[in-house]
Image (cartoon, rainbow, N blue to C red):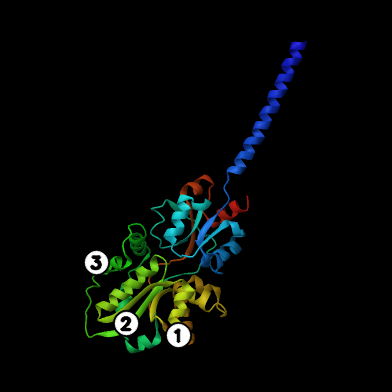
Amino acid sequence: MKRWLALVLAAILVAVALVGCGQDDSADTEEERPDVKVVGSQEFFDRADAMPAFEEAYGFELADEQKIALATGDTAVTEKAAAEGTDGANAAMAYGTDGTIAALDLVVLGDPKGVQPIYQPAPIFRKAIIDEYPQIPMLLEPAFAMLDLQVLQSLNAKVAIEGTDPGAVAQEWLESEGFLPGAGGDAKGPIVVGSKIDIEGPVLGEIMIKLLEGDGFEVTDKTRTGATDVVRKALLAGEIDAYPEYTANAITVFYADEAIDPAVLKDATMTYEEAARLDLEKAEIVWLAPAPANNTWAVAVPREFSEKYDVKTLQDWADYINGK
């Protein structure tokens, strides 16, 4: 009898221990789910059409401690940080034309709600420059017309991954496509060309510079001028004469107070035409025809994270953040 009671008691103790172990395993599993930490520029976290737009559309909110804000808008830096888990980062600000995404084994999260407007890069100039040199659009637009998504990703990768100077990348591509050497001609200018401080801005800026120089223009290179607000102020102040800008920025940033049909931002032609109209009327800035590539804001995560937690879209990501 005593032996039987001892066996029963032992069985009960084993069962309790197993249940306890199961509870601990569950708790451990919950603890293993890492908190989302996103690395991006301060502009990405602050601009209404960037992370705040994703938060509003997909129903999540990042806490301050989940944001790793950098002074740079260089997505090669943000994406590398997410790929390597720097400071716990497991997501990064990205752009649609980034050349580093595949190389770093990242996945761009889908945007099923179509939150992002269309951001096509285009050369923009002070009107006084175009009035004086009306041949500039014919000089630059054919090259920009060839900058589709694949071409820009390739050019950006040469800078971000191979470490090639943007000027050399621009020179090589323009020569390979027959745009250089240019026609030369009488000395013209000077023209000051700026750009933003990311990877793509200097590449586009250098394409503009090389084409202008090839036609005999004296050009001052001020690429990497600063973030969007800095380079915009420089253009308006006449400190630079031109730089590459993105079509939707005119509507979502520069003239955000204007009453504009949101449908405009979903159509490439309408976005460009509205940007050109607003800037010409209000700031005497001329937009040349844009490139076909759409360099929209995006969020990229490591492929391992995406597959382990089944996070493929921004909605999946929002559900993960919200603990669903």
- Residue 62 in percent (x, y) is at 60, 59
Who's the residue at 31% across and 84% down the image? 190
Q: Measure the C-alpha gap from mark 1 to mark 3.
A: 34 Å
- Residue 172 in percent (x, y) is at 26, 66
Give the secondary structure at mark 1: helix
Residue for badge 1 = 280
Which mark, by number, is residue 171? none
Q: Amino acid at mark 2?
A: Ile
Which mark, by number, is residue 176? 3
Give the secondary structure at mark 3: helix
Who's the residue at 32% across and 77% down the image? 140
- Residue 275 in percent (x, y) is at 47, 79
Q: Nearer the viewer, residue 159 or 111?
A: 159
71 sits to left or right of 12: left
Q: Are marks 1 and 3 in contact (CB under 8 Å)?
A: no
Which mark, by number, is residue 136? 2
In this view, 181 is above or below 286:
above
Q: Amino acid at mark 3?
A: Ser
Q: Amino acid at mark 1?
A: Leu
Return the disc, 1 or 2, that comes first in the chain's sequence: 2
Return the disc, 1 or 3, that comes first in the chain's sequence: 3
Return the disc, 2 or 3, that comes first in the chain's sequence: 2
Label 3, residues with CA under 10 Å away: few <14, some 14-19, many ≥20: few
In this view, 293 is above or below 301:
below
Rendered image quadrant of residue 318: bottom right
15 sits to left or right of 98: right
Q: Nearer the viewer, residue 281 or 65?
A: 65
Who's the residue at 40% across and 86% down the image? 127
Who's the residue at 39% across and 57% down the image? 100
Q: Is residue 292 visible?
A: no
